Image (spheres, rainbow, N blue to C red):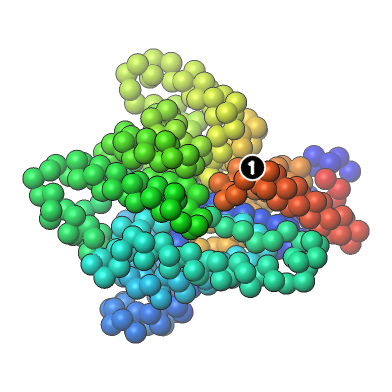
Amino acid sequence: MNKHKFTKELYNKEFLLKIPKTDLHLHLDGSLRLPTLIELAKKEGIKLPSYSEAGMRDKIFKDSYASLDEYLRGFSYTCAVMRTKNAIERISYELAIDNQNEGVRYIEVRFAPQTLMSDDMSFEDVMNSCWKGLERAKKEFNSHSEILNGEEPPFNYGIIVCAMRFCDKRFSPFFASFFKNHKYSAPLETINLASQELAKATTKIVNETDIPIVGFDLAGAEEGFPADNHIQSYDIVHRNFLSKTVHAGEAYGPESIFQAITDLHADRIGHGFYLFDEEKVVSKKNRKNAKKYVLNLAQYIANNRITLEICPTSNLQTNPDLKGSMKNHPIRKMIDNKLSITINTDNRLISNTTVTKELQLVIKEMKITPAQLRNIIIYGFKRCFYYGSYVEKRDYVRDVIDYYEKITEEFLGKGIIYHI
């Protein structure tokens, strides 16, 4: 059989669970276990629309959403239960365990610490709590004999700190105080200052502790809140050798992606959904030849191996242009143009998904071949912001590739998949 031909056998869940995987675009505050959220809400006296899992699934955490606003509503409940050190540690620990249980060997957990901070919980408290939970799960998993004997690659993780394109006093006790103390500044100026404060706090932690912060991100609404409002913040982390990713091209066009790359030194792009959309090129200069602009941007991304963090289910739930079908997703075009992409969950709770589900969706709807699947999986490990030396990362990636090929041969022998 042609090795490039799509086969339904590749969709086999047992195989997808077994192979080593990554999740590089994973929001901590969107990925709680629902029972944990309910339990913590009861403990802290936080009002929920329902205190049953079925009720919360029906009212808040749905399989599909009518709008982005409805999708984002869930974060008001998740963040509300995460404003204690014990809660953050527990949620981080459980998130790592959930990933380990489906064969995910490397995760990068991102969140906006300022949405959790208060007078009672500092930036350092938030980051330490997340680290403690993830580290505990890592040590437990890596104590298994298969890992110690070198038969399987260990579990690893990194933490990505998110600044917000938009925020105001409603976002958290920290932001309420911050905006109050900057009441004579315009909103964008205050957002800029909050972002710079976060960048300075992040680099201080990176330089003075062993907390594995591996990257800096910019999240939130693109339209009206441009990336260049955060140039100073990204310059701070750039000068301190921190890797950078930016949510861009999720709701705005190719020029937003270009700005993230050129102004913020982005090594990866979160989503990048509208990369190829000529209609969303808005500046008069670039609209004159929008097709060429898009092709040049895609070529630049390919040449520089700037990785796109794709979140299929999240896109289906928040982007009306997809009309509920993956057939309209640009991921096929990204693959055909040989771009470096990874498949991610975005928010495991809010999107009701897992890495395995995301891979199944893409393989089925995009007719992914075995060779293409292998590339996507390996890109995740090669383009991760690994906490450690380059030599250590290369060794880790080599172990992962060897293990992937071992699993492939095992399932080939069972007749479940074809040779890749």
Q: Is residue 2 left or right of residue 100?
A: right
Q: Position of residue 213 (x, y in %)?
A: 48, 53
Q: Residue at x 45, y 62 (%)?
A: 28
**In the depicted structure, whether residue 10 falls above or below residue 383:** below
**In the depicted structure, whether residue 95 falls above or below residue 404:** below
**In the depicted structure, whether residue 415 falls above or below residue 289:** below
Q: Position of residue 207 (x, y in %)?
A: 44, 49
Give the quarter of the image for residue 49: bottom left
Give the quarter of the image for residue 10: bottom right
Q: Position of residue 119 (x, y in %)?
A: 23, 67
Q: Is residue 161 left or right of residue 186?
A: right
Q: Position of residue 167 (x, y in %)?
A: 25, 51
Q: Residue at x 68, y 43 (%)?
A: 391
Which residue sits furthest bottom? 43
Q: Residue at x 86, y 48 (%)?
A: 419
Say which quadrant the C terminus sits in. top right
Q: Is residue 378 left or right of residue 409?
A: left
Residue 60 in sight = no
